[in-house]
Amino acid sequence: MIGQSGIAVKHIIRADSASVAALANYGVATVHEAMGRVGLLDAYMRPIYPGAAVCGTAVTIFAHPGDNWMLHAAAEMLEAGDVAVLGTSSDNTDGMFGDLLATSFRARGAVGLVIDAGCRDTAVLRDMGFPVWSKAVHAKGTVKATVGSVNTPIICAGALVHPGDVVVADDDGVVIVPKLHAAKVAAAAAAREAKEEGTRKRLGSGELGLDLYGMREPLAKAGLKYFEDEAALQRELRS
Amino acid sequence: MIGQSGIAVKHIIRADSASVAALANYGVATVHEAMGRVGLLDAYMRPIYPGAAVCGTAVTIFAHPGDNWMLHAAAEMLEAGDVAVLGTSSDNTDGMFGDLLATSFRARGAVGLVIDAGCRDTAVLRDMGFPVWSKAVHAKGTVKATVGSVNTPIICAGALVHPGDVVVADDDGVVIVPKLHAAKVAAAAAAREAKEEGTRKRLGSGELGLDLYGMREPLAKAGLKYFEDEAALQRELRS
Amino acid sequence: MIGQSGIAVKHIIRADSASVAALANYGVATVHEAMGRVGLLDAYMRPIYPGAAVCGTAVTIFAHPGDNWMLHAAAEMLEAGDVAVLGTSSDNTDGMFGDLLATSFRARGAVGLVIDAGCRDTAVLRDMGFPVWSKAVHAKGTVKATVGSVNTPIICAGALVHPGDVVVADDDGVVIVPKLHAAKVAAAAAAREAKEEGTRKRLGSGELGLDLYGMREPLAKAGLKYFEDEAALQRELRS
Amino acid sequence: MIGQSGIAVKHIIRADSASVAALANYGVATVHEAMGRVGLLDAYMRPIYPGAAVCGTAVTIFAHPGDNWMLHAAAEMLEAGDVAVLGTSSDNTDGMFGDLLATSFRARGAVGLVIDAGCRDTAVLRDMGFPVWSKAVHAKGTVKATVGSVNTPIICAGALVHPGDVVVADDDGVVIVPKLHAAKVAAAAAAREAKEEGTRKRLGSGELGLDLYGMREPLAKAGLKYFEDEAALQRELRS
Amino acid sequence: MIGQSGIAVKHIIRADSASVAALANYGVATVHEAMGRVGLLDAYMRPIYPGAAVCGTAVTIFAHPGDNWMLHAAAEMLEAGDVAVLGTSSDNTDGMFGDLLATSFRARGAVGLVIDAGCRDTAVLRDMGFPVWSKAVHAKGTVKATVGSVNTPIICAGALVHPGDVVVADDDGVVIVPKLHAAKVAAAAAAREAKEEGTRKRLGSGELGLDLYGMREPLAKAGLKYFEDEAALQRELRS
Amino acid sequence: MIGQSGIAVKHIIRADSASVAALANYGVATVHEAMGRVGLLDAYMRPIYPGAAVCGTAVTIFAHPGDNWMLHAAAEMLEAGDVAVLGTSSDNTDGMFGDLLATSFRARGAVGLVIDAGCRDTAVLRDMGFPVWSKAVHAKGTVKATVGSVNTPIICAGALVHPGDVVVADDDGVVIVPKLHAAKVAAAAAAREAKEEGTRKRLGSGELGLDLYGMREPLAKAGLKYFEDEAALQRELRS
């Protein structure tokens, strides 16, 4: 069951590295659209500094409020290119992660952290260039008393994350791409970006989306009425 | 009625350009005070990057949760110097606006966006220097299925906005100046700023506001008692 | 009683300057840990610009919602190295503090502000380099009608603050060190930092916290079971 | 301008009593739909006891945080059948209204209160049967120091309210009917309710909305695909 | 993928009726504990009236903000004893469900609704005795424009729900029991309740949990020190 | 220091029973006013059922997020008429308290609980008539792993509470009366209530607070201007 404690899985199957490399070319919004508008974490997950961006494979952590023990257990499972993703058994903003763990995670090859709880030492993390997306920034210390799990499926900020899934994160937030769909989503993102390039040019030249996307007729059918000005509108409302 | 859907007004009366130019010299706090302490949007409206600042005329948009169709319809009404202002029929944080719409809006002359919903592609918008004030940053995509309105009065983050009103926004948030009062408010802001200059110098030299503003007597009348130190206070409390 | 209005204490006993100077070397997280994991303000208190950091002695202010009168009264009590700390009688996000008060506070020697309410003129404050930690950024103006207190014990964002206590604040938030414990806490912070230096090196070389902290046996005792891979876990769950 | 202080209008034009009486027959949801899905206050406005329900004409109050002076000024303008509606200049949860003011309001003929701030003495108000919709229940006392306004247009919990508008409130929240539209909205509500009666019967007999509303074809066009069971879905996804 | 739109599965495998009947004997807290402390929805999910309680099998609905179309599509799949459970693609508080849908759902055999969005007509629902757990009560109407899904896995208020899972809900909130584990969880709940009966009696007679659970030694080991009184504590702190 | 863990004080000095008995006659709002408008807990603290009311002496508990061990340790210190008051080291909504602990607390003589965290088994607690004021209702279970303290000063929902202080709680929330001031506050509450009785009668007869409190002149001085009607106001604004 999701949220079961006491399990640590050592070796996981990660999304193929070609797909991860491909997905690294796109922003969170593009990947989310390419998946069919799914996979986002809740809007409260924010980067600890502007410009943070990462794409990697998930090592998942399930932890309890006020307890960061499992982050230490997870360090052992981290490989080059991994992003640790932590969900909790209940609402918590404690600073479970700081510069010591970041030093350890980086030494193991990890490239970032997504944590549905708090983060601290954020000035140092910014200087290190170790990106973190968190629910809060808070210095609150934690204990190491209760076991959770490592590399089991978790729910993090409203999203289901399996070990090995692709994590794409930037200023807009975080999106999870299931490992089985990574190649397909990367292709769809590429196609979307290619198409958007042309659209961007036409919009940049002043062409309207109304015309470019053919929206005028659907808008009229859906009931949008145009009025020359406020006076015309008032005449209609009074009639 | 506020919130009526299905209306798009093509030509609106904007605040006079001299007043808009004048108001551009002042920050949100100064303009808010010059209006008699009114006109602010709620505190949850934040710029998507620090240092964002804009002053322009409002093209208003009324949209429904999860639906950004009206932003496309509004693009057609935008003119040089406009700021799009979007209110919704209910609470929503979806990313209704991103870099494609920003490209379109900029091509039409718009200089910013105020949106009581979410914004995405924020890294690109920051690089473009296209300022947005929003309720949330979220990559969540939206549909184009339900019509709202363009250029009708709206409520955005607790403030009433009419088409053509002046929008002043900076790091402190957003204030709306009704177009009819724009000239008067610009003059009051100038007067306030002039007066504050002298005050700033005196305060900067170490003079106290207590003396400068003549507050000592009113404070005493209102019941403030001074004690030399903690010991004196304790003696009083025991007596 | 906490929250009593009408009292202004002129001279307070501040934490000794050597301890304040010593504490200035450490971040909020380190000081909080050195105190035994206490003293933090709530997580909603955020700096108005990244990189803000301060260490000083508290001049406390008790104010009422929408009323910044006491900030003016407090200016008189500020000395070099002080940090003003403001608590309110109820929830409020009004912009009680702006650039004029910052100019005044700085002229009196103050080095920062911690305010459980709103702050405005934040772009100017950032340019001035006057750090503020607040609950909100909002331009909302305030009145000067109701007296509170200066230099009495207050509760600010969930923490008890006495006049003269040490205030340490950075990107992670704010921690209060009672003046009587300042020297002891500074020493504990130094010890902690010294110890962490060695830990950081070992973690940076790839050594695991599991080994460094001797966590393997406690984790096993607490019930953590390791599985080679997902397949091994599934076998166990089915058995 | 919305939010101007210092104005008290003695006599206002109220919605006609027949329309008010007619609207009293319908719930908030029905009235909101009959208006074209507009006019609701934000979802955080809740009744202080279950079963509270009222329909009356608005006497509007604009007040400042922590200050309930204007409620006393408003008492004088209340007539039989009025509902006081209070908006504030900023976020506040103080208990501006309690049993004494309720006694006074009732003596003047008022039948309820809608307040975008706090309420107290709620046990007594429940016993009195004086319904209040508020943002918070809190005992926090307030001052009488700063003037606001009575009977000017206000924004209350995201809705624009003019003096004399109809206020309909029940367990679902609060809706405002502009006085000019009251008769039309009452008629539309009656029509809606009549139509719903038949719908209710058919749905109650087990008929599906899909058939009753003719949704099957639109759903198919919009892309909904039916699968006999999970196995059929899996076959499709794999193909 | 979780959150895919456009799918409606007609026939699902439900938890066995004996397990459902057994689980109906226990409260949410007991079932949550019996599962190993997992399965709860977030704390913001509240019943629309006190005393609401239900136990049934989940028909899942995935819907978009401001759009209740899928509730109609789901009605067709409801059978006796089902509880509809709705998750959304983003944050929304609109009143997607009211008395007409409740009439339809009940006619189909459904015994309740869990909705991560808003609910309306709550007074009528209370009178009908149709229990709903929701994120908000709000009268806001919705459109029928965008398809979601019925009977696919969803995330609702932070919990993963599969079609056919058991939903147990009461005044404490909502817990989901995966259908495969239903029998085992029901047995564990029975065992827990049996054991608690004895504990309750002993605690009711004044026996301390400290003794009953043997906590004195572990507390001492974990560092809890007892002091006769405040004076003894002060002596220790000073020594 | 506030928030120190590892301390349990067995015997405390409680407010004198006569004062507690006297304070039991008044509501939270009255007691708060009688104290000079201080002592309230934050507005988010709500009773788990309507009509809950209690007055007793505080046994304080300091606990960590997700850990209810200290509630068991506190049970031993409870005496007849006590109200347990729990503060935490950080934000938490877990259900630390349920019917078993309530049975134990009641057996020891306790008459209620105030908990800055979650509560569960609320239906049973309501049936037992054991009143609880909490930050949340949630079934989430907790561990017993980390020691906090019993009968040390705590901060609970923004208020400072010492062991033995008087806790008054009702539908309006919770107020803490320091034990040293209990007699004085009880007397002030009695005086206030006596005075309000006369006021209530006069207001109930239709007399205006404006006249009764002599507010007309102060309002005029503070700048309130009266207008006969909307037309008169418009004339003034245009002049």
Image: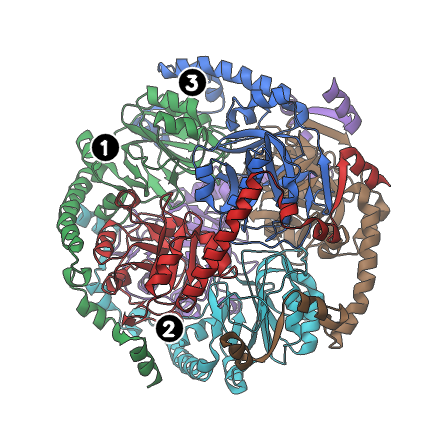
Chain colours: A blue, B green, C red, D purple, E brown, F cyan
Disc marking residue B15: 1
- Density class for disc 1 (Cα within 10 Å; few <14, some 14-19, many ≥20) is many
Find residue D214 and report its horizontal and vertical position in percent. Answer: 65, 27
Whether callout 3 and callout 2 share a subunit is answered: no
Q: Amino acid at mark 3?
A: Gly
Q: How far apart are labels 3 and 2 at the CA level?
A: 62 Å
Which of the two marks, 3 or 1, is nearer to us in this view?
Answer: 3
Residue F64 can be seen in this image: yes
Q: Amino acid at mark 1?
A: Ala
Do the residues bearing badges 3 and 2 touch, measured as CB atoms within 8 Å? no
- Write down the quadrant of residue E70 in the picture: top right
Name the residue that disc number 3 marks: A209
B127 vs A6: above or below:
above
Disc marking residue F203: 2
Along the line of sight, the residue nearer the viewer: F205 or F102: F102
Whether callout 3 and callout 1 share a subunit is answered: no
> Which secondary structure lies at badge 2?
helix
Which of the two marks, 3 or 2, is nearer to us in this view?
Answer: 3
- Chain letter of mark 2 equals F
